[in-house]
Image (cartoon, rainbow, N blue to C red):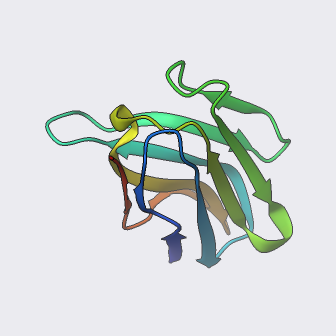
Amino acid sequence: QVQLVESGGGLVQPGGSLRLSCAASGSIRSIYVMGWYRQAPGKQRELVSAISNDGSTNYADSVKGRFTISRDNAKNTVYLQMNSLKPEDTAVYYCNAVVRNGISVTTNWGQGTQVTVSS
């Protein structure tokens, strides 16, 4: 079993910043990829950003230059620094981790944290 616990969501004005955190715990041998997805009302869940265990990253075009993903492998934690937030960034943000535990590889999700960008 792997648990992902997110924190850092909330209400922020346009142009503001938030930092999301996600800590993984449980039966973990290694974590291949950690990332953030988001889902706005009435829309499909979409990838925001991901970081692999070698530090390579990718971002959705809509957040490039505004969001930065980072990772602390010693703490099994991933962060998402979100700057210059826009109302269209409003969504539930979900942490995702692809984990090897023993001989199996599993995809795991956090419970989600609400981010609301509004004046």
User: Residue placed at 85% from the left, 70% from the top?
Assistant: 74
**Residue found at the very far front of the displayed protein:** 119
Residue 44 in the image, given as x and y percentages of width and height: 25, 34
Please say if 76 is above or below 43.
below
Q: Is residue 98 above or below residue 65?
A: below
- Residue 96 in picture, x, y percent from top left: 51, 53
Q: Could you tell me which residue is drawn at 79 percent across and 34 percent down?
A: 56
The answer to which of 55 and 16 lies nearer the viewer is: 16
Which residue is found at the position 43% from the left and 48% from the top? 13
Query: Which of 101/33 is in front?
Result: 33
User: In percent of the image, x 52 and y 71: which residue is there?
Assistant: 7
**Is 77 or 11 nearer to us in this picture?**
11
Q: Is residue 74 left or right of residue 105?
A: right
Residue 76: quadrant of the picture? bottom right
Q: Outermost residue, left direction?
A: 42
* Residue nearest the observer in this picture, 36 or 12: 12
Quadrant for residue 40, please give it: top left
Name, please, the residue furthest toward the top: 61
x, y percent for residue 69: 69, 44
Specify whether 91 is left or right of 23.
left
Residue 63 lies, in percent from the top left, at 55, 28
Counting labels gives 0
Q: Is residue 19 above or below residue 54?
A: below
